[in-house]
Image (cartoon, helix red, strand yellow):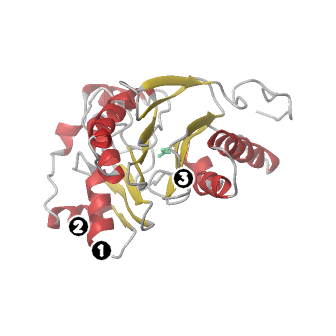
């Protein structure tokens, strides 16, 4: 049984590409990388790779990560400029070195040594991204995260994002931080996150989710518990949670998603399906629903 899940409706192209590989016996790691490439190259996706949100100086500085669930090896890069596919740098770091994370210039230098193609920054920045930056319009911070299980039982996860719109130079979100933005262990499960990285990081969402599956919870129970706990913990300590959303998969390829805000969508495909399903998830609790959780568990100040 193979299976693939990824964050947001825009990742249906990733799920299609990943499924093509998985259905012909391909590896989970290759499937998540291939899927993420599609989204990194799509200038219409405003939060990943080409066309992504810009930092306060108007630069495109990208974060990405991979994790191999068979070996627990991981590679991540932060604030990388001048590369369309930061996920390739993350994979090279995982495959070719004993390090886990490289940042900024060090990551860029490593990528050049590895022969990963560079792009002029201006070629990666779209007019829409420039316009959002000029107006400082909206707040964007989403991530493509993808989890795959292949027919050999191997699991892999990868993430890629431009991070928060107008972020401070050097800011790093959850997406390249192991245990926060992503985690996978073959035989147990995988998880990855999208949303406001600072809130996801301080509640270590992805490792928690995989730990709960390891302890016997179903994907649905685990991911719902993680989002609820993260949100409620931040509230209990006087904070106001921003967007937190996760997708996860167990070792049987069963998938689930949860969020604390409206309009979170994800794509999902497994063996036996012709095309990915794109589903929108009702929030477990709603950060924007005034001072009341959807299920009435507790009130909080906005
Ligand atoms: N979740 C992406 C970020 O906050 O950078």
Evaluate if marks 1 and 2 touch, with contact meaning CB atoms under 8 Å apart.
Answer: yes
Count residues near mark 1 (Cα–Cα under 10 Å), then give few for <14, some for 14-19, many for 20+. Answer: few
The relative height of residue 280 versus residue 238 in the rendered view (above or below) is above
Q: Is mark 3 within 8 Å of ligand 1?
A: no
- The C terminus is located in which quarter? top right
Q: Secondary structure at mark 2?
A: helix
Count residues near mark 3 (Cα–Cα under 10 Å), then give few for <14, some for 14-19, many for 20+. Answer: many
The relative height of residue 44 versus residue 227 in the rendered view (above or below) is above
Residue to which mark 1 is pinned = 97
Rendering coords of residue 215 (x, y %)? 69, 57
Comparing marks 3 and 1, which lies closer to the viewer? Answer: 3
Residue at 41% from the left image edge and 59% from the top image edge: 67
Residue at 22% from the left image edge and 50% from the top image edge: 82
Q: Earlier in the sequence, mark 3 or mark 2?
A: 2
Evaluate if marks 3 and 1 touch, with contact meaning CB atoms under 8 Å apart.
Answer: no
Comparing marks 3 and 2, which lies closer to the viewer? Answer: 3
Residue to which mark 3 is pinned = 189
């Amino acid at each position: 049984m193979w299976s693939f899940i990824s964050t947001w409706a825009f990742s249906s192209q990733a799920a299609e590409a990943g499924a093509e590989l998985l259905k012909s016996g391909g590896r989970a790691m290759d499937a998540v990388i291939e899927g993420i490439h599609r989204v990194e190259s799509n200038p219409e996706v405003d939060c990943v790779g080409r066309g992504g949100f810009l930092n306060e100086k108007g630069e495109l500085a990208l974060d990405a990560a991979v994790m191999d669930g068979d070996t627990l090896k991981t590679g991540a890069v932060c604030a990388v400029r001048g590369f369309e596919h930061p996920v390739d740098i993350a994979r090279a770091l995982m495959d070719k070195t004993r390090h886990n994370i490289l940042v900024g210039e060090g990551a860029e230098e490593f990528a050049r040594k590895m022969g990963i193609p560079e792009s002029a920054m201006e070629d990666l920045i779209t007019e829409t991204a420039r316009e959002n930056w000029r107006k400082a319009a909206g707040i964007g911070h989403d991530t493509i995260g993808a989890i795959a299980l292949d027919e050999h039982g191997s699991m892999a996860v990868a993430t890629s994002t431009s991070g928060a719109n107008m972020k401070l130079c050097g800011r790093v979100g959850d997406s390249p931080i192991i245990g926060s933005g992503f985690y996978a262990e073959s035989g147990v499960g995988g998880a990855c996150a999208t949303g406001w990285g600072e809130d996801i990081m301080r509640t270590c969402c992805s490792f928690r989710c995989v730990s709960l599956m390891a302890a016997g919870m179903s994907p649905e129970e685990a991911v719902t518990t993680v989002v609820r706990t993260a949100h409620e913990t931040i509230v209990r300590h006087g904070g106001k949670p921003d967007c937190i959303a996760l997708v996860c998969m167990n070792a049987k390829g069963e998938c689930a998603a949860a969020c604390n805000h409206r309009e979170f969508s994800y794509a999902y495909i497994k063996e036996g399906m012709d095309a990915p399903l794109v589903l929108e998830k009702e929030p477990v609790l709603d950060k924007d629903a005034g001072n009341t959780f959807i299920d009435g568990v507790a009130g909080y100040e906005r």
